[in-house]
């Protein structure tokens, strides 16, 4: 089949060309049925801060059949969290979240680049959860995406929303101010989150694995959708972070829990690439 004819045929079927034609041979093959495909790569930083939070403070909708994993349950596989809960038993009912910031040099949605030049910051909020597995899902299903944020400077917000229904656009910064030192900033309606993160030591490649998929259902504005993500190239580096949140929001409350910062520390990854299919 000639290339032009193939592209017209794919467009008629509303199949994202990047998924059908393939992006990089190191990705796994996404299952059929996606409504959109996005690719993120040239990641200079992914900086995450795990935390506990009161699940009552998340008022968004949950996908049918899903529930948040409590800190008490999570502690069975994490001795540090178990020790923390012995001293703070009131936190056993809390949920376990992860707030992550990224700086990326490539962001494409359905084959169209959303970055004419330079880099862009992103942030997302995931939480440990469990629930029914769709037949289309691949890899582990351990997280729900509760929210995500993108720079309001992105020119085609409609394309972002087409591939990430939880997306919000705000003031967001992820900058390396000097070698190994990163400043993060996220402005939310009820709080402002800032961090200074110091990296040290050498990058370490994640051990190779035949399993390079994960699936992430969405809550909140994204209920009814999930991602299947195929990825490669993660490298880790030791990091320590100084985090603060000013305001009355959920993260401000989470980071005021005495002693939790000694258990839930800062993680740093870079160099990875990911191809994500959005499924109904």
Image: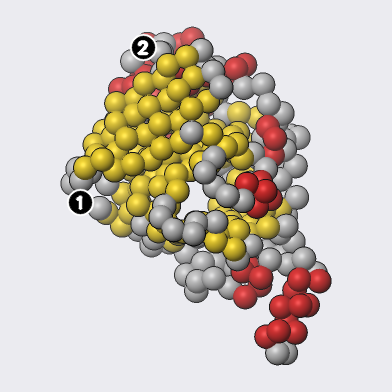
Taking the spot 30% from the left edge, 22% from the top edge, the residue there is 262
**Residue most toward the right?**
12
**Residue most toward the left?**
201
**Residue most toward the bottom?**
2
Would you identify the image quadrant in which residue 277 lies?
Answer: bottom right
Taking the spot 58% from the left edge, 49% from the top edge, the residue there is 155
Q: Is residue 178 above or below residue 190?
A: below
Image colouring? secondary structure
Q: Is residue 61 left or right of residue 99?
A: right
Q: Is residue 202 left or right of residue 22?
A: left
Mark seen at residue 213: none
What is the crowding at mark 1: few (fewer than 14 residues within 10 Å), some, or many (at least 20)? Answer: few
Residue 36: horizontal and vertical position, in percent?
68, 58
Mark 1 vs mark 2: which is more N-terminal?
1
What is the crowding at mark 2: few (fewer than 14 residues within 10 Å), some, or many (at least 20)? Answer: few
| Nearer-the-camera pick, 236 or 248 | 248
| Element class at badge 1 | loop
Instruction: Give the labeled residue for mark 2.
Output: 258
| Element class at badge 2 | loop
Instruction: Give the labeled residue for mark 1.
Output: 202
Residues at marks 1 and 2, CA–CA distance in whole angstroms: 31 Å
């Amino acid at each position: 089949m000639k290339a032009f004819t193939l592209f017209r045929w794919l467009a008629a079927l509303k199949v994202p060309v990047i998924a059908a034609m393939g992006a990089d041979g190191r990705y796994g093959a996404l299952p059929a049925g996606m409504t959109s495909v996005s690719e993120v790569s040239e990641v200079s930083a992914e900086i995450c801060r795990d935390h506990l939070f009161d699940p009552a403070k998340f008022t968004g909708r949950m996908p049918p059949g899903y529930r948040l994993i409590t800190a008490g349950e999570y502690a069975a596989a994490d001795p540090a969290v178990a020790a923390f809960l012995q001293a703070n038993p009131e936190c056993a009912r809390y949920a376990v979240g992860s707030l992550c910031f990224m700086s990326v040099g490539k962001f494409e949605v359905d084959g169209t680049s959303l970055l004419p030049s330079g880099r862009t910051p992103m942030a997302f909020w995931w939480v440990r959860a469990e629930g029914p597995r769709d037949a289309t899902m691949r890899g582990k299903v351990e997280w729900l995406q509760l929210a995500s944020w993108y720079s309001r400077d992105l020119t085609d917000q409609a394309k972002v929303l087409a591939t990430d229904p939880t997306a919000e656009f705000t003031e967001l910064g992820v900058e390396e101010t000097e070698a190994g030192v990163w400043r993060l900033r996220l402005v939310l309606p009820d709080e402002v989150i800032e961090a200074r993160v110091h990296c040290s030591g050498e990058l370490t490649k994640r051990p190779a694995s035949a399993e390079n998929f994960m699936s992430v259902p969405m809550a909140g504005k994204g209920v009814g959708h999930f991602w299947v993500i195929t990825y490669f190239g993660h490298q880790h580096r030791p990091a320590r972070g100084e985090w603060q949140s000013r305001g009355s929001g959920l993260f401000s409350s989470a980071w005021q829990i005495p002693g939790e910062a000694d258990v839930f520390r800062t993680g740093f990854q870079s160099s990875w690439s990911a191809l994500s299919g959005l499924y109904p």
